[in-house]
Image (cartoon, rainbow, N blue to C red):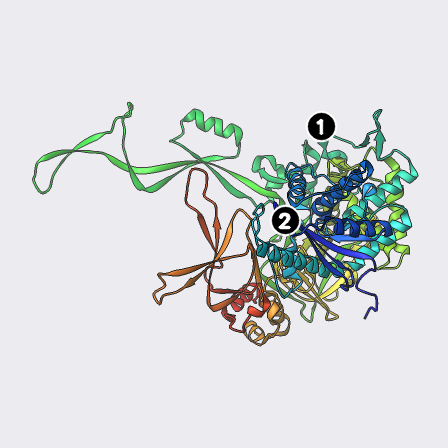
């Protein structure tokens, strides 16, 4: 166990709250020994005490730690300090009230809403800042995470949401509640800070070593900025140029179009018709953008790939029966399409050429008299149909390989793959695939030239020289992995979409070449293909041939493979599976991960994943595991609704289930399934033109109890909910 302190001396965690008639600032020292809450309101104005505290931090160059503090909290404090400094310069007494601070805060929020958040530059900070929101990359839309979600994931005893709507004028008693909440947020931020000590230490070490401020960089940005530093060190101005006004602009390579034939390496000698067709298809494509380039491809555009691709039928409905011209126009757009009609159960009125109902005479059986009626005929629908591949793909021996900008993918699904006594289950992954493709084949963003490959290779070699876990090894890894993704980022100095396509296409074709050679082994079957690796099952006795193929492939494509052996795999799909290595270790992916979830991920009801994995690997039934599990936190779930909506709990108050009591809940809510609980309902504002609020049930098949305060939890769990959900994850023998 590490003896390193879980705090850094002279770090101070803080958070502010702003309302029209009250401002509060709560702080805690990193060791939790010094905790303060200040107030600015009509009953108490502690502005001077706050300023004295902030000046003390600034004088000693101690750091302030927050959550989204760079985007909100610190700019507000910075503005107050700047105003106080200006007042002192003018020789006047500085005074500010809660409403003044509230207006500063609202202006800061508005700049963020407008997409131009006013951030105080690090060099202008009066007090050094560390933003836990930033370094965890929670400002990325795909990773967006609130402090309340973190409270759930950190197993906090009490999850508290902002108790009052923004903009409310608070009473004195409500101010006391707000101060309690403000302090709660600081203590929860401090808890998250302790989890981030290694990340902060890494940034300190890197900043010192490279004389560059990495302190509020996320991991990806660390890698990219390090690479840029190395490029600029080697050739000044290679990444950025300065215009006549002193403004820094990125160097980039932009293309009006990219001929993919120019992206292909020359070492492909495919023998299988599927891969020959695939290579030919790539060589004929000219693209103008990379997004969606390999998706929704119509049959006639697939060329020979269509012979081997799995496709879906797409239907376009005609309003009426199409005439010859309409059919001809449709087939111009969809040359391999067809028109089909479908008889519906419904009847419709037959009409003449003028659109008038056609009538017929008939004899009424009851009266024997002649009558007239409108003629009804079966109603028909008419569709223009054509085949579309949802993504570029080929099917070989029943296994589908998907191709896309994100790499090659494919997997058997909803099945158990087990290594029998006469079989081997082998996995081969390419070591640092994308970096090595660039290094080995001398591929670079055009504007960065050969220098890019020189630095890329140097970084790769340096990483191998540093011990795993060291700051140097970490930054090298981040640099290697960050460059490829950024080559398709129009806001990056690495931007060259031709480079992106060269790497991704050749990565896929290289693995296709490996697959082709594997398939020459009699009895071999492909289990998975996933970006940089291939998993296969092969007969025992074929290992030498398997390794021979791998080594020859390495020589041909100038890449290196890393190997693993599996005992068994429980596969839902390519992104969700459980794999047991022959040494007993276990690999969990996607829906089966419970212990190594990221902070931005949902940690709800981890007992479900744990039970499913345990049944598959150890044979302990899901029900037995769940009913005997004693960690209450593993049963907890959470839900969140935006501030524009609300969350309520409906509790039945009569025996017939006709009357319910409605309890308003906080917008992020922790709960568990319970037979005696109520129903969670999300209430959304009316749509435009309506006055009716919209209501959507959450897990409506089950009753739940809330426990934002963990003391509300009781072992009255509805185990059936968790058993039911776990059984959905269990892969069984077919």
The quadrant holding residue 406 is: top right
In the rendering, at what x and y percent does residue 603 appear?
63, 61
* Label of residue 226 in the image: none
Please name whichever residue, 678 or 129, is drawn nearer the observer in this view of the structure.
129
Relative height, residue 446 to residue 191 (above, below): above
In the rendering, at what x and y percent does residue 67 appear?
71, 52
In the displayed structure, does residue 360 sit left or right of residue 7? left
Quadrant occupied by the N terminus: bottom right
The quadrant holding residue 240 is: top right
Label 2 sits on a secondary structure element that is loop
In the displayed structure, does residue 528 sit left or right of residue 127? left
In the displayed structure, does residue 388 sit left or right of residue 44? left
Give me the C-alpha separation between circle 2 and circle 1: 62 Å
Please name whichever residue, 575 or 269, is drawn nearer the observer in this view of the structure.
575
How many marks the image carries: the answer is 2
Quadrant occupied by the C terminus: bottom right
Give the residue displayed 60% in from the left and 35% down from the top.
Answer: 301
Instruction: Sort mark 2 into few (<14), some (14-19) or many (20+) by Cα contacts within 10 Å.
Output: few
For disc 2, the marked residue is: 42
Please name whichever residue, 238 or 640, is drawn nearer the observer in this view of the structure.
640
For disc 1, the marked residue is: 256
Give the residue displayed 58% in from the left and 47% down from the top.
Answer: 166
* Nearest-to-viewer mark from 2 and 1: 2
- Residue 278 seen in the figure: yes
Label 1 sits on a secondary structure element that is loop
Q: Are marks 2 and 1 in contact (CB under 8 Å)?
A: no
In the rendering, at what x and y percent does residue 235 appear?
91, 36
In the rendering, at what x and y percent does residue 163 appear?
57, 55
């Amino acid at each position: 166990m590490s003896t390193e302190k879980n705090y850094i001396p002279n770090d101070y965690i803080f958070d502010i709250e702003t309302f029209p008639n009250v401002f509060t600032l709560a702080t805690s020292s990193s060791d939790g020994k010094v905790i303060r809450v200040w107030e600015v309101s009509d009953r108490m104005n502690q502005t001077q005490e706050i300023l004295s505290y902030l000046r003390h931090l600034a004088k000693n160059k101690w750091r302030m730690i927050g959550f989204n503090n760079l985007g909100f909290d610190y700019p507000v404090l910075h503005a107050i300090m700047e105003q106080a400094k200006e007042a002192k310069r003018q020789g006047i007494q500085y005074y500010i009230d809660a409403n003044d601070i509230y207006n500063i805060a609202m202006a800061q929020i508005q700049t963020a809403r407008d997409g131009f958040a006013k951030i105080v530059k690090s060099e202008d900070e009066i007090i050094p800042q560390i933003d836990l929101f930033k370094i965890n990359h929670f400002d990325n839309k795909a990773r967006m995470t609130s402090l309340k979600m973190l409270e759930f994931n950190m197993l906090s005893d009490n999850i508290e949401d902002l108790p009052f709507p923004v903009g409310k004028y608070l009473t004195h008693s409500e101010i006391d509640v707000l101060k309690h909440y403000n302090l709660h947020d600081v203590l929860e931020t401090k808890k998250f800070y302790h989890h981030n000590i290694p990340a902060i230490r890494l940034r300190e070490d890197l900043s010192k070593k490279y004389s560059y401020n990495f302190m509020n960089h996320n991991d990806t940005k660390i890698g990219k900025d390090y690479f840029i530093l190395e490029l600029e060190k080697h050739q000044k101005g290679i990444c950025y140029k300065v215009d006549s006004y002193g403004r820094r602009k990125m160097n980039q390579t932009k293309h009006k179009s990219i001929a993919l034939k120019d992206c292909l390496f020359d070492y492909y000698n495919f023998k299988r018709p599927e891969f020959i067709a695939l290579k030919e298809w790539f060589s004929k494509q000219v693209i103008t953008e990379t997004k969606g380039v390999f998706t929704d491809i119509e049959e006639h555009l697939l060329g020979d790939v269509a012979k081997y691709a799995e496709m879906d039928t797409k239907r376009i409905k005609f309003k009426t029966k199409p005439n010859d011209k309409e059919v001809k126009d449709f087939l111009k757009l969809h040359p391999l399409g067809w028109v089909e009609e479908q008889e519906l159960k419904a009847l419709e009125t037959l009409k003449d050429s003028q659109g008038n109902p056609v009538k017929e005479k008939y004899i009424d059986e009851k009266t024997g008299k002649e009558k007239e009626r409108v003629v009804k005929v079966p109603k028909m629908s008419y569709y223009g149909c054509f085949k579309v591949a949802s993504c570029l793909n080929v099917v070989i021996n029943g296994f589908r390989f998907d191709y896309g900008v994100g790499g090659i993918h494919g997997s058997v699904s909803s099945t158990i793959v087990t290594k029998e006594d006469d079989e081997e289950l082998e996995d081969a992954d390419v070591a640092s695939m994308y970096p090595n493709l660039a290094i080995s084949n001398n591929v670079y963003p055009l504007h960065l030239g050969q220098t890019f490959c020189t630095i890329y290779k140097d970084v790769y070699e340096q990483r191998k020289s540093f011990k795993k876990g060291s700051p140097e090894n970490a930054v090298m890894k981040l640099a290697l992995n960050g460059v490829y993704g950024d080559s398709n980022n129009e806001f990056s100095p690495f931007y060259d979409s031709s480079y992106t396509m060269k790497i991704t296409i050749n990565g896929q074709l290289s693995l296709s070449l490996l697959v082709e050679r594997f398939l020459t082994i009699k009895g071999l079957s492909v289990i998975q293909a996933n970006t940089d690796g291939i998993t296969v099952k092969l007969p025992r006795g074929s290992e030498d041939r398997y390794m021979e193929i791998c080594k020859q492939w390495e020589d041909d494509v100038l890449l290196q493979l890393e190997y693993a052996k599996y005992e068994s795999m429980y596969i839902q799909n390519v992104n969700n599976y459980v794999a047991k290595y022959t040494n007993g270790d276990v690999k969990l992916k996607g829906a089966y991960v419970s212990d190594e979830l990221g902070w931005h991920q949902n940690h709800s009801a981890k007992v479900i994943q744990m039970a499913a994995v345990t049944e598959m690997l150890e044979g302990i039934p899901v029900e037995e595991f769940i009913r005997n599990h004693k960690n209450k936190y593993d049963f907890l779930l959470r839900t969140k609704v935006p501030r524009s909506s609300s969350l309520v709990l409906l509790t039945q108050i009569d025996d017939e289930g006709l009357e319910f009591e409605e309890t308003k809940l906080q917008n992020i809510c922790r709960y568990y399934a319970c037979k005696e609980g109520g129903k969670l309902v999300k209430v959304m504002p009316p749509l435009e033109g309506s006055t009716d609020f919209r209501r959507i049930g959450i897990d409506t098949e089950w009753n739940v109890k809330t426990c934002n305060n963990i003391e509300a939890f009781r072992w009255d769990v509805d185990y059936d909910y968790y058993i039911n959900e776990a059984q959905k994850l269990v892969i069984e023998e077919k």
